[in-house]
Image (cartoon, rainbow, N blue to C red):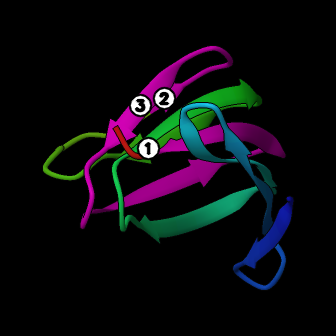
Amino acid sequence: MLTQNEYFDGKVKSIGFETSDGKATVGVMVAGEYEFGTSTHETMKVISGSLTVLLPGASAETVFHPGETFEVDAGQSFKVKTTEASAYLCLYGE
């Protein structure tokens, strides 16, 4: 079963689905700045575009390009900036 998610007045949209390893979403965000919170561990992989991310506890942002991943523990928040429409895959849980 697929679920649709929309955040930040439609600037971030994703489709949720189940994999053999658990829940996942694939989504797109348009140019902008966003702050996300996590309820479970998340692994995000950039599919296209690039994401400039300020991870929890980090003092500097890191740019992630297609094929690169980053992880955020449960109960954390992280900031994302993008200057172009960018796609991602997010895997939930460990």
Place of residue 34 in the rendered image (x, y in percent of width and height, measured from the top left): 55, 67
Q: Position of residue 41 (x, y in %)?
A: 34, 49
**Is 52 above or below relative to 63?**
below
Label number found at residue 70: 3
Q: Point out the image quarter for the C terminus.
A: top left
Residue depicted at x 86% and y 59%: 2
Task: State the image coordinates of residue 64 (x, y, percent, origin top left).
Answer: 53, 26
- In the visual, does 66 lie left or right of 4? left
Quick one: 49 or 17, which is closer to the camera?
A: 17
In the image, which is nearer the foreground, mark 3 or mark 1? Answer: 3
Considering the whole magenta stretch, tell me its main secondary structure.
strand
Contact flag, marks 1 and 2 (Cβ < 8 Å): yes
Q: Tell me the quarter of the picture where residue 33 sits.
A: bottom right
Residue, x 36% and y 36% (percent of image)?
71
Tag in front: 2 or 3: 3
According to the picture, the residue beneath numbered tag 1 turns out to be 53
Q: Is residue 65 magenta?
A: yes
Look at the image and tell me in which quarter the N terminus lies. Answer: bottom right
**Seen in the image, is 81 located left or right of residue 19?**
left
Residue stretch in magenta: 63-92
- Is the residue marked by circle 2 packed among few (<14), some (14-19), or many (20+) residues within 10 Å? few
Q: Which residue is the site of mark 2?
A: 63
Marks 3 and 1 close (CB-CB < 8 Å): yes
- N-term-proximal mark, 2 vs 3: 2
Amino acid type at mark 1 = Val
Label 3 sits on what residue type? Phe
Q: Is residue 39 above or below residue 79?
A: below
Q: Secondary structure at mark 3?
A: strand
Residue 2 counted in the magenta span: no
Quarter of the image where one finds residue 12: bottom right
Q: Is residue 24 left or right of residue 78?
A: right
The mark that comes first in sequence, 3 or 1, is 1
